[in-house]
Amino acid sequence: MLQTTVAGSLPKPSWLAEPEVLWAPWRLEGEELERGKEDAALLWIKQQEDAGIDIVSDGEQFRGHFVHGFLEHIEGIDWDKKTKMGIRDNRYVVDVPTVTGKIRRPGPVHLSEVRFTRAHTSRKLKFTLPGPMTICDTIADEHYGRRADMAMAFAEVLNEEARELDAAGADLIQFDEPAFNVFMRDVKDWGVAALHRAIEGLSCATAVHICYGYGIKANIDWKKTLGREWRQYEEIFPALNESRIDQISLECANSKVPLELLALLKDKAVMVGAIDVATNDIESAEAVADTIKQALKYVGADQMYPCTNCGMAPLPRRVAEGKLRALGAGAALARKALGHAP
Ligand code: ZN
């Protein structure tokens, strides 16, 4: 019970990529880069295991960015045709590549990464993929015309990919959908349907991660506009509770999400974010245990997976290590308080 896990990304070591930035440029190339990514994944597997994390991830050490790491291997995208786009409903403007033809996956994208990680841990393994809606909000469209249609095309190739990762031994495949709490109506109209297409035929557990983003300035400024209580989840949780996705990952630590909204997910397993990724302050084990305790009012201990609010990629490495240890120790305290062996 109260098995711990991470949302997904962990910082790249400074010898691999520039630290503390998103879209960090690699510092190695060629064969050295490939070996460097493996070494970094090994390092984080060990750090997670030592911190008492039950369901480990590769820390997304093999990819530069959580969306483009997948898209780089997909056909139908023109990377030279950059379009300025205000993504996440104009929260930040970036140059994004453009879909100019039919989306196609010519071959496996992350298969070797899952095989490598699987071979180096006996813990349960979680692997993350970008969700169809979030992909569509991070790329311009000159081919499909409707976002819902483009999302379904991406869902098809995500499904091809996910089936291979499932067969290669991933225990849980998580789709990252930060766009879900920006375009709440679309979630109900086609977002959940696209996820269903993406998980078709999988035998492993499935999850969707919905958050308020990395702790970068654009997100911190955006959160200030959301009012005293963040109720975005309230609009989408009923649809997710009805969905065929097994687990929902969300943020609860230092967030203005009213925890009673968790009651809307009564039929789901819930990854409760108990680590704030928007600050370098490392939580005490007691603070983590307290977040878990508050969430236990709405989610059963057998259904709850203490987790980080979001990825930790932009944090200093030492901070992320400390937060992993706090998560492991806090969950142990919470188990003990429930009368279980820590
Ligand atoms: Zn997130």
Image (cartoon, grey):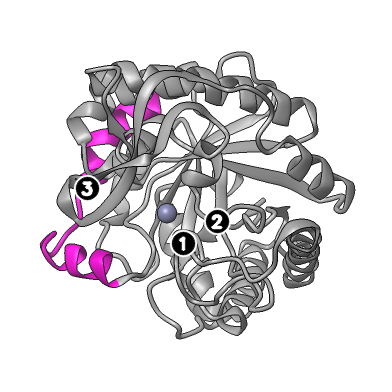
Query: For the residue carrying disc 1, how many other residues have a C-alpha within 10 Å: few (<14), some (14-19), or many (20+)?
Result: some
Return the x and y of residue 183 as percentages of the image width and height.
21, 37
Is disc 2 placed on a helix, strand or loop?
loop
Return the x and y of residue 6 as percentages of the image width and height.
59, 58
Figure quadrant of the C terminus: bottom right
Q: Which of disc 2 and disc 1 is earlier in sequence?
A: 1
In the drawing, does residue 133 fall left or right of residue 231? right
From the image, tell me which residue sits under label 3: 84
Q: Are marks 1 and 2 in contact (CB under 8 Å)?
A: yes
Return the x and y of residue 138 as percentages of the image width and height.
33, 42
- In reply to whether residue 228 is colored magenta, the answer given is yes
Quarter of the rendered structure image containing ligand 1: bottom left
Image: magenta residue range: 217-243
Return the x and y of residue 293 as percentages of the image width and height.
47, 64
Q: Residue at x 50, y 53 (%)?
A: 65
Query: For the residue carrying disc 3, how many other residues have a C-alpha within 10 Å: few (<14), some (14-19), or many (20+)?
Result: few
Of tags 1 and 3, the one toward the viewer is: 3
Q: Residue at x 60, y 66 (%)?
A: 26
From the image, tell me which residue sits under label 1: 23
The amino acid marked with disc number 1 is Trp
Can residue 243 be seen in this snapshot?
Answer: no
Q: Nearer the viewer, residue 316 or 259?
A: 316
Q: Which of disc 2 and disc 3 is earlier in sequence?
A: 2
Q: Tag on residue 64?
A: 2
